Amino acid sequence: MELLCAERVSPGSAESARVGPAPVPTAAASDPVLLRRRVLDNLLRTEERYAITANYFGTVQTEITPHMRRLVAEWMLEVCEDQSCQEEVFPLAISYLDRFLSTCMVGKSQLQLLGTACLLLASKLREPSSRGLPAELLVFYTANSITLTDLCSWELLVLSKLKWDVAGVTAHDFLPLLLSRLPLRGHVNTEMVQRHAQTFIALAARDYEFTLYPASTLASCSIAAALRGLELDGHLPRLHELTGIDSDCLQTCLEQIEEMVQKLIEERVVTAPNGQGREAGGWTPPPTQDKAHSNAATPTDVRDVHF
């Protein structure tokens, strides 16, 4: 049998492979096949498997509260922003967090450890292999309140409780499928609308009230909120046709997103420009200097919660 290799190697490729910095990983080009209607239908059917259908506070969870979950979620978002993670990492990590909390009770001292393990798993799945969040770095972000052994053990624990089903459907997965089917060409930059919608999805993931919405509902309403923020039609009727979601449910979720954004704007207005307003609440901002000489971005009231 004869094997033929058609790979072409440039003259300087071997030399550059031995000398010089490692190549920067590039994202794969968009595939139009992934925008077909059957992909959207498959996601709409699959999302039910990863949905949180009941309030686990007061039933499964007896120690932690929605406020504690929000503190950990905000810390996780700060870590993702500080490390310039892919947009999909944070919502996927929050999905792991909520799925775990809906099935297994944890103590308040274990909540940040759980969030750290979820970040590690989501980073491994959605980041390029060379850009995944190192476990040692995540331990650093907790101000060394956990150990590497604890993190590895909880990584396996989360995987076992999720039954190794980690390729979950998030609201980010619906954005390109829905945007490509809206009549936006010539009216607005769809990439800008997608960036705004991604921001709304990340902000909504911090609040437990949005967890009870399916991923398709959150994606649809984030797109509508982004369009309305640009003084355009939100296209709720068209989104209803595409997803089959009840119109009243879409309207309610949209109003909650817009209310959340308005509150965030008001909070930023009253907060001091140097961030003293957040530090006064017991929050240590993310490191802006060399990580070897800065403090970890850990809210102190997550490590030792007293309510």
Image (tube, rainbow, N blue to C red):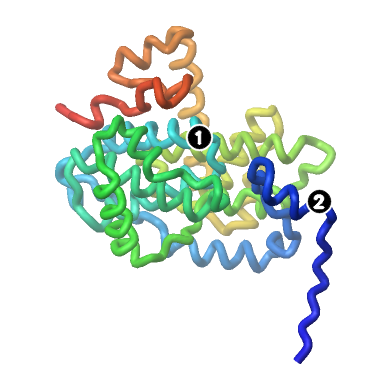
For image coordinates 41% across by 65% down, the residue present is 165
* Distance from Cα at disc 2 to Cα at disc 1: 33 Å
Residue 306 position (above or below residue 105): above
**Most foreground residue, 279 or 61:** 279
Tell me where residue 195 appears, x and y as whole percent: 64, 36
Tell me the quarter of the picture where residue 30 sits.
Answer: bottom right
Q: Amino acid at mark 1?
A: Gln
Tell me where residue 249 appears, x and y as whole percent: 48, 47
Q: Amino acid at mark 2?
A: Gly
Q: Which corner quadrant holds the C terminus?
A: top left
Tell me where residue 85 appears, x and y as whole percent: 53, 40
For image coordinates 42% across by 60% down, the residue present is 50
Judge left or right: residue 269 versus residue 278. Answer: right
- The tag on residue 190 is none
Q: Which corner quadrant holds the N terminus?
A: bottom right
Judge left or right: residue 87 versus residue 211. Answer: right
Tell me the quarter of the picture where residue 244 sits.
Answer: bottom right
Q: What residue is disc 2 on? A: 12
Tell me the quarter of the picture where residue 11 sits.
Answer: bottom right
For image coordinates 28% across by 49% down, the residue present is 55
Provide the secondary structure element on which disc 2 rests.
Answer: loop
- Furthest-bottom residue in view? 1
Residue 237 position (above or below residue 66): below
Q: What residue is disc 1 on? A: 83
**Most foreground residue, 148 or 37:** 148
Q: Sequence-wise, which precedes: disc 2 or disc 1?
A: 2
